[in-house]
Image (cartoon, grey):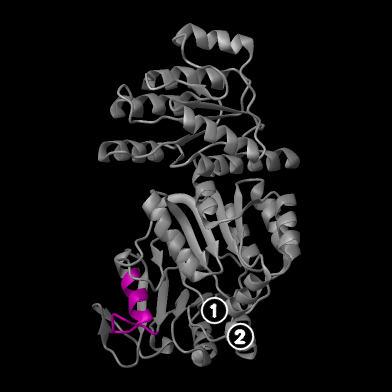
Amino acid sequence: MSLDVFFKPRSVAIVGASRSEEKVGHVILRRMVEIGFEGKIYPINPNADEILGIKCYQSISDIPGSIDLVVVAVRADVTPAIIEEAADKGARGALVISGGFSEVGNWELERKLVEVARRGGIRIIGPNCLGIFDPKDKIDTLFLPERLIPRPGEGKIAVITQSGSLGSTVLTMMRKEGMGISKFVSYGNRADVDEGELLDYLMEDEDTEVIAAYIESVADGRKFMESIRRASRRKPVVVLKGGKTSSGDRAVKSHTGSMAGSSEIFHSAVRQSGGIIVNSLGEFLDSTQTLVSQPPMSGDRVAVITNGGGFGILAVDALESIGFKLNPPSEELERKLRRILPPYYPIGNPTDLTGDSTPEQFLEVGRIFSESGEYDALFIIPLLGVPAMIPSRTLEALSELLRSSKVPIVAVAVPTTDEVDSILRELKKRGLPIFPTPERAAYALLSLKKYGEALKVKS
C-alpha cells in the first residue's frame, strides 16, 4: 500500500479537536486550516458544535461518507477503538500523535493498536509522534503553534525523525537558514510504518532531492540498509544516529521504547549502503544544505581561494585534517593566474587575493581553477569587509562563478552589515552554500566527497 494517504488525503478526521487553544487537538486543527488544506476536515469532539467555524462530529461514525486519514490526539487507551471505527469509515491511514504506548512500557496496548489497524487495512505513523508537515500538499499535523515553531517554506529536502522535539528544532533551524523542505515526518515509536518504508517512499518522491534521517534505532536493520542502498542511487541520504554511547542508548530506550544498538556496526552498514553519516545536528543541516545545491565531488582535491590569509590557513588545516588533498597548482596553472593577478599576490593553495581583491578577481581566478582539471572543488572565502568587495558586484560575480564552475563550490563568509547579510542570503537562494567558519564549510564539503565516493562504488 502506498503511503500517499498520509501526504495526499482528500479528507481528514481529527479526533481530539478542541476549542481550547492550549490543547494539542486545537493546534492540529488550526494548522490544517491555516496551511490551506484543500480537502475536507472533520473535527471530532462530542462536546462541541463547531471549532474555528468548522462543523464538529461526535464520533467518526457520524461523518457523512468516507474518510482517508485520521489524526488521533486522545488518550492512548481509547486509540484502538478509534482506529477500528476509522476503518469502518474507509480510512487507510492514521497518524497517532498520542503517547502512552511502548515508550512507557505499554507494549501490549501498542500491539493491540497495530493488530486492529491491520485487520482494518489501516497503516499507522506513530504513536508518540508529531506527524507530518508537507508545505506543497498543505498538510500540517504538528501540534506546535506556528508562532512558536515557524515552518520553513517549500524546498527539496525531506526530513524523517524518530524524535519530535529534535525534529521541531530542525524545522526552526531550517527556517532560520533559509532552507526549504519537501516533507517532514516524525514517526515516533514506528509501531507500523518504519524508517525503511519512509525512505522507499521518499526515494520515489519527485519533490525530494535529499533525504535527511535522524535515527535512534531501526526496526529491521537489513531492510533499512536495503532502503538506503536503493535510495542513495538516486539521491543523497544523510543519517544522524542518536544513542551512540551507553548513556545515549539508555535514553533512547526511555524515549521511544527501543534499543539503539551498536553505533559502530550501524555506521559501517550505512556507509557500505551508500548513506552519508554525520556526527552532529549542525553537520546534519550543513550537509543537507550543501547536497541539495551542489553536485557530488568526483575526487578529493580542493582549491582554496581567499582574500584573508588567516582564513586561508584555517581552511587548509580544516580540509586536510578530514582527508582532502590541498595540492599546489601546476606550473602551467600558475602561469595562467600570473597573467591576470598582480605580482605580489601569493599563488598556491591557498591562493590569497589579499585585501586589494575585487569580486571580479574571485570570478576569474575561480573559473581558471575550476576549468584546470586539477581540482574537484572550490573553497572560496570572500571577506566582504575590504574596500573593493562591493556587495552588489560580489553578488553578480559569485553568481556567475556559481553558474559557470565545472566543480562544486562551498564558501565561507561573515555578514558584517545588513547589506552584506542580504547579499549572502541571496547567494544562498541561488545555490551557493555559505558558512561562517572554515571548519563548518569543510565538513559540508565532506558530504559532497562522501556522496561522490558512494556513487562510484555503485556504478
Q: Is residue 35 visible?
A: yes
Mark seen at residue 422: none
Among the two numbered marks 1 and 2 on one chain, the one whose residue lies closer to the N terminus: 2
Placement of 329 over or under 313, stated as above or below? above
Q: Residue at x 29, y 28 (%)?
A: 392
- Label 2 belongs to which residue? 110
Question: Residue 328 is drawn in which quadrant?
Answer: top right
The amino acid marked with disc number 2 is Glu
The amino acid on which the numbered mark 1 sits, given as a three-letter code, is Pro
Q: Is residue 19 magenta?
A: yes
The x, y position of residue 310, in whole percent, is 48, 31
Give the quarter of the figure containing the N terminus: bottom right
Label 1: which secondary element: loop
Label 2 residue SS: helix
Q: Is residue 322 left or right of residue 73?
A: right
Residue for point 48% across, 18% down: 365
Residue 119 left/right relative to 437 = right
Q: In this view of the protein, can residue 459 be seen by the observer? A: no
Q: Which residues lie in the magenta part? A: 16-31
**Closer to us: 353 or 244:** 353
Residues at discs 1 and 2 in contact (Cβ within 8 Å) = yes
Q: Is residue 218 left or right of residue 410?
A: right
Q: Nearer the viewer, residue 229 or 205?
A: 229
271 is within the stretch colored magenta: no
Q: Residue furthest left?
A: 53
| Marks 1 and 2, how far apart at CA | 8 Å
Residue at x-position 54% and y-position 65%: 161
Find disc 1 in the rendering and name its residue.
127
Instruction: Estimate the x, y position of residue 262 in percent, counting from the top left.
Output: 74, 66
Which residue is farthest front?
Answer: 310
